[in-house]
Image: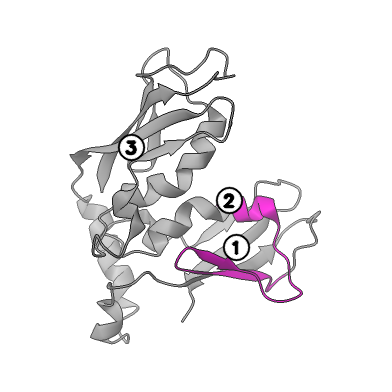
Amino acid sequence: MYELKVTATKVLGRCTAEPSVKPGDYFTVRNGDISVPDGGFICIWALQNMLSVITPKERDIAEDKDSDWMWRVHHLQCPDPEGRVIYKIERTEKIEANAEKAEAMEKALDRDAQQTASEKNASDELKSLRVVVDEVKGKCTSEMKLGDSFTLHSGRLYIPPDGHFCLYALQAALPQLPARQRPLQDGDWMAEDLRVICPDPAGNVIMRIEDDD
């Protein structure tokens, strides 16, 4: 795992945040936790555009630099075409794995002992993932039901013919997907926490993220 520093480097237009983001504003990410300097803030719209890149950037990238685009991504911009705040993402510190988490991970991996060595060591390409509705604990206004799903192959997302997937539920899963496509380090919480919940407290749609073999 790595600590990240995310810094605003340019403002190509007029930032509508109040107060406006300015070059030099930054926040840090460590073990999945975001911190800002005293008196600072994070623009939520800009953060939205970064989440799917921050999670894999925290982790080792095992793929060859010529085959994985994540190596090449160091800058992102906010979604406002009039503001266009450019951010740089950089690794500032290597974080050693927590010993207790690593031990828990080792026990979890024992449950998968029947997998072949070739399956475990297949890190030369991105995993394909499937996100499937596991539970619906409330009333989903998008009429999501058990078994609804989408798959992710490389950077392409597919929804089954005649199916649908709620945009807001998709948003809840999206930040984790690029990281889960890549090998996870021992002790990484993501290896055991396989479920996410949609942001609607009335729907409480719970999704499971799994390998799509």
Which is more N-terminal, label 2 or label 1?
A: 2
Task: Tell me where residue 98 appears, x and y as whole percent.
Answer: 23, 49
Q: Which residue is mark 1?
A: 207
Residue 93 sits in quarter:
top left
Residue found at x 47% / y 59%: 177
Task: Tell me where residue 99 appears, x and y as whole percent.
Answer: 20, 53
The answer for how far apart the CA atoms under marks 1 and 3 are is 29 Å
Asked whether 76 or 162 is in front, the reply is 76
Q: Which residue is mark 2?
A: 172
Q: Secondary structure at mark 3?
A: strand
Q: Which residue is mark 3?
A: 89
Amino acid type of the residue tagged 1 in the rendering: Met
In the image, which residues are magenta?
146-172
The answer for how far apart the CA atoms under marks 2 and 3 are is 22 Å
For disc 1, the neighbor class at 10 Å (few under 14, some 14 to 19, many from 20) is many
Amino acid type of the residue tagged 3 in the rendering: Ile
